[in-house]
Amino acid sequence: MKKLLILFVFICLAPNALSQIMFSNPIIPGFNPDPSITRVGDDYYLVTSSWEYSPSIPIYHSKDLVNWNIINYVATTKEQLNLNDYESYGGVWAPTIRYNNGIFYVTASLVKREPGLGAKEIKNVLFTTEDINGQWSLPIVLTDQVEAGIDPSLFFDDNGKSYLLLNRPPLSLSKTRSKIREIYIQEVDLKSKKLVGSQHILTRGFAAQSKYAEGPHIYQKDGYYYLLISEGGTGYNHAVTISRSREIFGPYIQNDANPLLTHRNLGKNYPIQNVGHADFIQTQNGEWWSVVLGIRLTDDGTHSIMGRETFLTPMVWEKNQWPVMSPMNGVVPEHFSAPNLPVHKIKPERVRDKFDQRKLALHWNFLRTPLQPFHSFDKGLKLNLLPTKITEQSTPAFVGRRITTSNFTALVKLEFSAQNHMEEAGLVIISSHFENYRFVVKGQQLQVIAHKNSDKLLASIKIDPAKSHYLNIKSDNERFSFNYSSDNQTWQSIVTDASSDVLGFRHTTGDYIAMYASANGKKSSNQATFKWFEYTP
């Protein structure tokens, strides 16, 4: 009776509360950083960074800004993009998607890294298509010098001209001050697909001695050019700031209310951190929203196997004034009223993938770019045992998917008989080629191996290679347990409470759970058959 009374009072005090549709952040969970968004009619398209994974640059589609599904990739062939010599944490950075006069454009940075955080090669490239669900063009190189910077963003002016925005270290400063970045702009000739004219420096950020001014986008509104950037670095101090000018080349006047959005003032125990790298979108109903990246930390506040994810934030433009992100409270909401758009229901992803469609579902990725096929379909997914290893900077026999929550269960039925003590197949959790877990049938053993720069054998048991192998990995707030069965009925715990410290904590990328097979440096004609794979967030 007491519960009914409380419900009655709630309804009386908030008559719209039960009818209002809510959404939860992140809208695209798992490793999906640097979101960029565009609208065509009542269709919304969003791209994110994909780093060293292929196919590259996932394209998500929605009609309500809340429910998204992956529909394609920008780069799907080795001719478009070959990532084989790209380091972990290198690859495809910060794409921007735009639509103009019937053509979709995606710009992105291709970055090869040197030890540490430096870059030894940067190409800023442009892909185009008239059919977002079809094949995209080969990449057109707009810049190929490290000094040109990263984070390319196209802007189409109302006067018909087109421009490219980038961020780079100021040419006038020494490399010891490379954390200082400047945003600059240059005209693009869309017919020749080349940069033309002079470069114009627009800003180094809002804060005095601001670090890492990045992620630039320009929007036209009410006679102004609004320049949206992020600054403070893509970690804990990430922030979104804005400036504006009557002229495209400036001068740009900073918003006195900057930063528009940041969580750095909320303390390191706040559940969503590292908020920034925003992009604005206006709905067909006139509402404004922003997509931003952020990180959900685990309870101890130190890790995130999901890495940077895509969040949705409400915003408004005050009359003849500046935009306000997340009005009234100034934070990226964990839950909020959904946009005023018809609900777009999407087909849920299958928990168990039986690999019976003769092709991989779009959420599966390879590690770097396979130059030759190593997988096939025959009553499951077959992986050839390549010589390459997951612990090398290479393209192994690897089919993986993003981890989307800190609590999950992955279960696979594997049929595999090693021909020698070197061959292995099973499941992996990977952050990089030097930070990963392997849960594999190796020879006549089942092994759990932690790799942080070198292999460390955590457990090994003898098994019957003639039987089926059921491998189960559970994550409980990023503490991993590894379990084994030969019949999917009786289970044996192999390792419990393994730490995600092995995977490190890169706030740039997130981790994958994957099927994997290797002959560990030898040639082999052997195959591993994964009958099915289950992933349960």
Image (tube, rainbow, N blue to C red):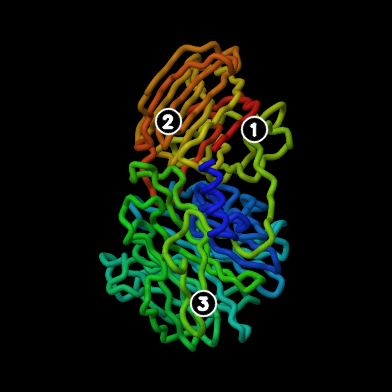
- Residue visible at 51% across and 83% down in the picture: 319
Q: Tell whether label 3 touches label 2 (CB within 8 Å).
A: no
Q: Position of residue 292 (x, y in %)?
A: 48, 61
> CA separation, marks 2 and 1?
21 Å
What residue type is disc 1 on?
A: Arg
Q: Position of residue 13 (x, y in %)?
A: 53, 59
Identify the residue under disc 1. Answer: 352
Quadrant containing the C terminus is top right
Tell me the element at label 3: strand
Q: Nearer the viewer, mark 2 or mark 3?
A: 3
Crowd rating for badge 3 (residues with CA inside 10 Å; few <14, some 14–19, many 20+): few
- Residue visible at 52% across and 65% down in the picture: 314
What residue type is disc 3 on?
A: Trp
> CA separation, marks 2 and 3?
45 Å
> CA separation, marks 3 and 1?
45 Å
Q: Position of residue 194 (x, y in %)?
A: 57, 74
Identify the residue under disc 2. Answer: 480
Task: Give the mark nearer the N terminus: 2 vs 3.
Answer: 3
The mark found on residue 317 in the picture is: 3
Q: Can you tell which quarter of the image residue 237 is in?
A: bottom left
- Residue 90 seen: yes
Q: Is residue 486 above or below residue 525?
A: above
Q: Can you tell which quarter of the image residue 102 is in?
A: bottom right
Q: Nearer the viewer, mark 3 or mark 1?
A: 3
Observer-nearest of 124 and 456: 456
Crowd rating for badge 1 (residues with CA inside 10 Å; few <14, some 14–19, many 20+): some
- Residue visible at 31% across and 65% down in the picture: 179
Q: Tell whether label 1 touches label 2 (CB within 8 Å).
A: no
Q: Position of residue 261 (x, y in %)?
A: 41, 66
